Image (cartoon, rainbow, N blue to C red):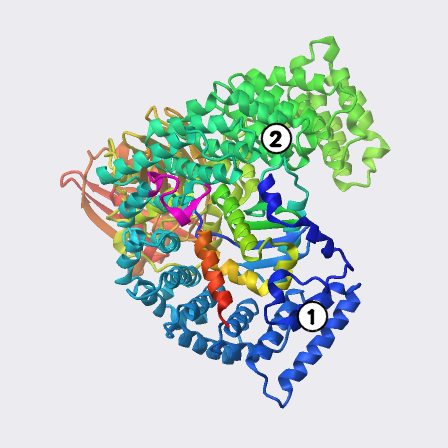
Amino acid sequence: TPVIQALWRPRREDYLRPGADTTAIMPAVSKGDGMRGLAVFISDIRNCKSKEAEIKRINKELANIRSKFKGDKALDGYSKKKYVCKLLFIFLLGHDIDFGHMEAVNLLSSNKYTEKQIGYLFISVLVNSNSELIRLINNAIKNDLASRNPTFMCLALHCIANVGSREMGEAFAADIPRILVAGDSMDSVKQSAALCLLRLYKASPDLVPMGEWTARVVHLLNDQHMGVVTAAVSLITCLCKKNPDDFKTCISLAVSRLSRIVSSASTDLQDYTYYFVPAPWLSVKLLRLLQCYPPPEDAAVKGRLVECLETVLNKAQEPPKSKKVQHSNAKNAILFETISLIIHYDSEPNLLVRACNQLGQFLQHRETNLRYLALESMCTLASSEFSHEAVKTHIDTVINALKTERDVSVRQRAADLLYAMCDRSNAKQIVSEMLRYLETADYAIREEIVLKVAILAEKYAVDYSWYVDTILNLIRIAGDYVSEEVWYRVLQIVTNRDDVQGYAAKTVFEALQAPACHENMVKVGGYILGEFGNLIAGDPRSSPPVQFSLLHSKFHLCSVATRALLLSTYIKFINLFPETKATIQGVLRAGSQLRNADVELQQRAVEYLTLSSVASTDVLATVLEEMPPFPERESSILAKLKRKKGPGAASALDDGRRDPSSNDINGGVEPTPSTVSTPSPSADLLGLRAAPPPAAPPASAGAGNLLVDVFDGPAAQPSLGPTPEEAFLRFVCKNNGVLFENQLLQIGVKSEFRQNLGRMYLFYGNKTSVQFQNFSPTVVHPGDLQTHILSAPPALRSQVDGGAQVQQVLNIECLRDFLTPPLLSVRFRYGGAPQALTLKLPVTINKFFQPTEMAAQDFFQRWKQLSLPQQEAQKIFKANHPMDAEVTKAKLLGFGSALLDNVDPNPENFVGAGIIQTKALQVGCLLRLEPNAQAQMYRLTLRTSKESVSRHLCELLAQQF
Amino acid sequence: MSLHGIRFILIQNRAGKTRLAKWYMQFDDDEKQKLIEEVHAVVTVRDAKHTNFVEFRNFKIIYRRYAGLYFCICVDVNDNNLAYLEAIHNFVEVLNEYFHNVCELDLVFNFYKVYTVVDEMFLAGEIRETSQTKVLKQLLMLQSLE
């Protein structure tokens, strides 16, 4: 564009050619300006024909400067400045500088601006933590801050802001707020002080305590000087994230400031109007500040804000006041930030749809920047229930972008958006377009597209033959980019769904006919035919020998891993198709297999050959039976996609852009104890083993207060049926059932335990017709229980559709005995309102009981061995339920111990034994329950080798009767 | 939302020579050199049909080319692209005014003044002052000081 060209004098570039003589032409400013020696030196360096010449010239200069600094004659300020500046130049060329620091520090106390400036610049660029110098530097800064000379004060503040070290923070963090809010500080000083404070706060927040200055900082939003406001908004935005309540008053001030800017005419703000756009950067900053908070509570403020947002949307429709790109960029910077705020609030359907329409126009704009930004922004709109449908109307434009955009990053945004707008209604179209795109897609994004297609195909598969076709197409088109996760997953699904097995076998058989097919296809084909080849064996075109020879024709071209898989297919064929036995045995017997250099292949060949020769048909059929269904669990593909995208880039995909800010709000509004908020399950896992064992909770923790906390967010619903505490207690003696239910959400549990290991399936059902957003269940471990979270909840973009159920699997390992169960923390947004609840997961120590049968005399012998007072725990309590012997028996068995008959002389009594299995130790437990029907009382006695276990088991069990 | 603002500002020529490097985050010298090289590699392969934004590690670079120079600002992925793109242009216009038709050589010979211009307009990784009139007035005032 002409503007840009006019800004630079390209003809001057001629002088920049290597070897050009530049000494004759000094740039305009430097000519009449002081340091001629510096200009000459720079010219010399530029004239050097080689790196060696440059180094030689620099060494000469360094020697010169060193001798000047060491000389007897005291240098005047000008020379000092010049030499320090030369040193700086040499440093910036990439050479080490090991002297001159003291001279630079000396310049700080000069009373001439140009000398001071060079001194500060040197210090800022070459930070040196030499403590002696830091003291001198801080001293000079202190003097300048106290000088009341705004120029010097700004230099000092900029130095602190540029260095931002802890030492400087300690020295000045207390002074800067004072300078910032002092009535007599100049505007430019306030600007610098605000950002200087921001830097110190970012580096060491502990050094910047909030104080009475806080309120006055907020009022800087009203300052007459727009530059002061510009700097102050940044500071407030940073401070309010950690102290939202202290800064809450900024909302109304920001809204009224924004409103004044947005409604001003294009020339009202004079200096702050940029290409006819009033204060674009300040507007953007104010809009970002507002994104730190939920929508204003005050109706008047909210009304005013909505008006602002509407004005911005209206202005986007007005004809431009200038054809210059600067005008439209500045205007659209505000527009995009406005849309971000609208998406952040996610509560104004009208604005969301208008935003979507506006972005829709940009999708076809001639500016690539705008098309890119519109695609990116629409991605987040797609996840709002209010605008999802509106986004979907642009599907054709987005598909077109995927096909025609020249910039790969734009195509990538288009793919992200298609993924985000995908639902049952358009899945087939989107998946087929993505598959088509994959044929020509850039290598850099192929794997990601493959993962997206695989996820969409699975999530929206109505008939599984479509799913199988899609995955096989993926392998055909981009086999190299189909990771194990993807093709494992298709095998799992085919194995688990018998309605698709025949189709899968047929399709894979056809795919293998291709003369060159990808090795991943051979793997999938080998596995599927080995399991389900019989389903197509009736067709003479795919008779067993044909299937075998087709697979075997690929064998020699494949890697060891694939060949190993094929050998397994072959032995399965011997079982499925006895008529192939001789051929396959011949293959296994061949020297190339039996004496294969690869141990794995050799072993398989030897073992399979022997198995097929010695085993009877029945044994063979049992050993080589069809694979059992895989446990239904969330595919690991999604996790992989998230890993791939990285923390920053995840935004477009899984709504990560909005998560952090909404978490900020939650964190501010809800008193979340730090132990409960787990940023990521993996971090938590690592932390757990390393952490010192937490202090043992008080004994009462097991008895009372079983409900840890149900945060009452604004729209929290009362729970139905049993309280979470009651529900938790019921799980002591059973493994399956409903753990929690309110009007929004039901959480079901299925679990199984063996020795010290357990697996728990959690089912989250959305009982409403509205989608839950940012749905994130996490597990926290206050105790010694280590819980491995195998998979994230499967909802794409962390959403649970209305009426849908999602599943989470936890693998649990008990490391040692524990008292406190792990906590399940569930957070999501329902209709824009944050919901949070924390429940105790029904994992109690008795789950790791292994029942032990023993004879009466053994029981009594052990009972006596555990006779220390602390080994026994006893409780006498009133029956809470009818005293039914069968029910009691069932509960005791559910509790986990073995029930021993003929041990207690009184047949009414119950006696049990078992071992608590933990990784670190085993705890033998004996128990005795004596009902007294007349008194409606029980006496429960526990004896174990560990005091805490005895007491805990006793408390848990006593609450069951 | 980001707590960090601008991570760094770079001015480089097509050959990869750095004309300004302003860091708002702690990097050691090797890391800085690596970043400089990576940014150059990422930005110079793009043409006018490309956007002015490019993903970079976990950040993004907002850049604009003026004659032989690339002005690059590194920010968080969720920062406002167009606001920073125009912040670059605003900065360039100030340089142009201050150096009376700026060219690459001005930045070389007056490198120490360029830092002053930057600090007037950007501080602590944030936009400090956006009014060209105010910035130029201040720069001329400083120019007049001894």
Q: Secondary structure at mark 2?
A: helix
Q: Tell me whether marks 1 and 2 sit on the same chain.
A: yes
Q: Nearer the viewer, mark 1 or mark 2?
A: 1
Q: What percent of the width, then of the height, locates residue A570? A: 73, 25
Residue type pointed to by label 2: Val
Label for residue A41?
1
Specify the subunit that label 1 lies on. A
Q: Residues within 10 Å of mark 2 (few under 14, many from 20)?
A: many
Q: Is residue A317 left or right of residue A65?
A: left
Q: What percent of the width, then of the height, locates residue A903? A: 33, 43
Question: How many numbered marks, from 0 up?
Answer: 2
Residue A270 is covered by the magenta coloring: yes
| Span shown in magenta | A261-275
Q: What percent of the width, then of the height, locates residue A151? A: 43, 68
Q: Secondary structure at mark 1?
A: helix
Q: Is residue A102 left or right of residue A185?
A: right
Q: Residue at x 68, y 21 (%)?
A: A529
**Label 1, label 2: how far apart the Cα atoms are:** 57 Å
Residue A115 seen in the current view: yes
Which residue occupies the foreground of this view, B54 or A696? B54
The residue identified by callout 2 is A450
Residue A648 is covered by the magenta coloring: no
Residue farthest toward the bottom in the current orientation of the protein: A72
Q: Residue at x 73, y 53 (%)?
A: A14
